[in-house]
Structure formats: C-alpha cells, structure tokens
Image (tube, grey):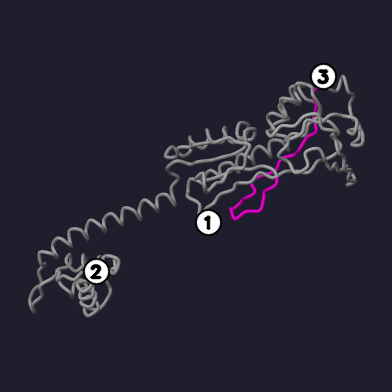
Amino acid sequence: MASEVNLNRLAIFAALVRAGSFTAAAEQLGMTKAMVSQHLARLEQELGVSLLMRSTRRMSLTEAGAMFHTDCVRILSETDAAIERVGESRDTPTGTLRITTSVDYGVAIVAPAVASFLKLYPMVQVDLTLSDQVSDLIAERFDLAIRGGWLRDSNLRALRLSSFRQLLVAAPTYLAASGVPRRPADLAGHAMVALSVLASPSRWIFTSSGGKRSTVRIPQVAQANSAAAVRAIALAGAGVAVLPDYLAEPDIRAGRLVALLAQYRLPEGGIHAVYPSRQPAAKVRAFIAHLRDRLSDAAGMTKS
C-alpha cells in the first residue's frame, strides 16, 4: 500500500491541519478549496483510513489521523533537512574530497596545492591517493583525478588545466662517459631509461625551431612504470631520459641533470582534471579552480 501513496499529499495534509480549515489551507497552498478536499479524499483512499472528521462548522483529526500527522511532520522536516544538506554540498565546499593522481605529479604539484586549499576551505578534508596506475574513479569512489599526458577515451568528464614540456635529460656522469648528443640522430648511439606506461617509450619526435620534425628510436637500457623511478635511474647515470618539466627542472637547476637538445621541442603533455559526475560537488569545483589558479600563477612566473 505504501508504494501507492502520493507523497505530495502528505504536505497538503500537514498544511490542512496547520491551517485549521480547507479555506485557509487552499489560500496558503495556492489551490482551490475543492482541490484540497480532493487530495485529502485520495490520500484517505490510498491509506485506507479516515484522517479527518468533518462537519459544516469544524474539522478534527481521527485517532489514526493524529498519529499520521505526527509522522508527516517528522517526514517533511527530515526532507527539508536533507534538501538543505544537498544544497550545502552543491554550494559550499564541505566533506571529504578523494583525489587520485600520479606519484611524481602528486608529490611535486598536487600535495602543495592540497595544503593551500585546506587553508581556504577548512570544512573540507582531503584524502589523496598517489598511484601510477589509472584508477577507476567510480569503482574506487574517487571524486577527482588529476592526470597528465594524453587522456584515454572514456565517459568521464575532463577539463584541461595546464600543460607541461617534456625534457630530454641525462646525468653529468653519463654524459662524461658517453658524450653529449648534438642532434636527434646522435641519440641512436645512446642508452635510454624509458617510461613503460607510454605507448612508444623509446620513440620520440623532435621538432626544430624551424618546424622540421625528426623521429628517433633510442636504444632502451632500462624502463620503469613511474616517472619518479625513471628520474632516479637517470640521476644514477644509467642513460638519457625524457621527463616532465615539473620533475626535471629542479635537478637541472641544481646541476644533477643536464637538459639536452634544448634547440628542439618534444610533444607537450596536458594536465587534466577528470571527474565522474555530470554536476560535480562544490568541493570538486573549488579544488579544480584552486589548482588551475596555482598552475596559471606558476606558468606566469616561469615566463617572466
């Protein structure tokens, strides 16, 4: 029987009891007195009990009607509270924000952004998971993924936040032993530490300042499924490597790595915010905006 009850009539019944008459209830609800009477009659029919005793002068609740009215008031109050909570989630960043990203980008970029984000939004807690495997956002209940490189086709929503340059680097010890490549063709005689998760880890396209493209396949000496691991192997002098700028530049400035073939460009990669919901919660929107602003500020400082 419960599944046959029109729940909208609960609100009409509660308003009728609160108003004390069909005429007053009709005015408050913006409907005719006849419509209020029809809704009450249908509700009583759906429930199978009489809720009101009516005469030409007054109305009063039956015993069943009094009990049902108490439950209606509670249900409507809980519904209002639920709607308010949903509205707060939509408009105000609150609750736990579950983010996943790669190990290298998470440590270098996302973790510092989380720290500054928490200062701005004290009602949010962040659960950050670092993994170089592509997580299933829906199955693993992530609100947001920050992914670098080139996105796979999926039904998820994605927003491009920024881009990064890829840099060919090597340790000074490796270059002292193997020589410094001066042009892309020279790389055929070098050893490469490759990132195995790429589609073509050892094949790279270099573009000169004049727009000429050179495709080179570099002999591979080692590979790893993490850019952070590739960096560590390259730092130890095992070979040349292609690393994202945010990971390589601190080592280049410190002299631990040397940027090679600087007159050539490698394909740029994108930084994307990926999320499963068509209408992301306020906490998701706020973090995406915060990270995008930080990336934009960092890009502006680099150019200046």
Q: Which stretch appears magenta?
A: 150-173
**Amino acid type indicated by mark 1:** Arg
Query: Can you give x and y, in whole percent of width and height, for residue 131 in the image?
Result: 60, 36
Q: Nearer the viewer, residue 248 or 42?
A: 42
Disc 3 residue crowd, few under 14, some 14–19, many 20+, Cα 10 Å: some
Q: Mark 3 = which residue?
A: 173
Dot 1 falls on a residue whose secondary structure is loop
Q: Which image quadrant is residue 244 in?
A: top right
The mark found on residue 278 in the picture is 1
Please report whichever mark, 3 or 1, sits nearer to the chain's N-terminal start.
3
Q: Which secondary structure lies at badge 3?
A: helix
Looking at the image, do the residues carrying marks 1 and 2 touch, with CB atoms under 8 Å apart? no
The disc labelled 2 sits on which kind of residue?
Answer: Ile
- Residue 49 to residue 56: above or below: above
Q: Residue sitting at 89 percent across and 26 percent down?
A: 180
Instruction: Look at discs 2 and 3 and give the one toward the viewer.
Output: 3
Residue 6 is left or right of residue 139, and the answer is left
Using the numbered discs, state the Cα–Cα distance from disc 3 to disc 1 in whole angstroms: 51 Å
Would you say 213 lies left or right of 68 here?
Answer: right
Q: Disc 1 versus disc 2: distance between alpha carbons?
A: 33 Å
Percent x, y of residue 31: 27, 76
Q: Nearer the viewer, residue 112 or 133?
A: 133
Q: Which mark is residue 12?
A: 2
Q: Look at the image and say whether residue 257 sits in the magenta stretch.
A: no
Q: Are marks 3 and 1 in contact (CB under 8 Å)?
A: no
In which quarter of the view is residue 288 placed? top right
Mark 3 residue type: Thr
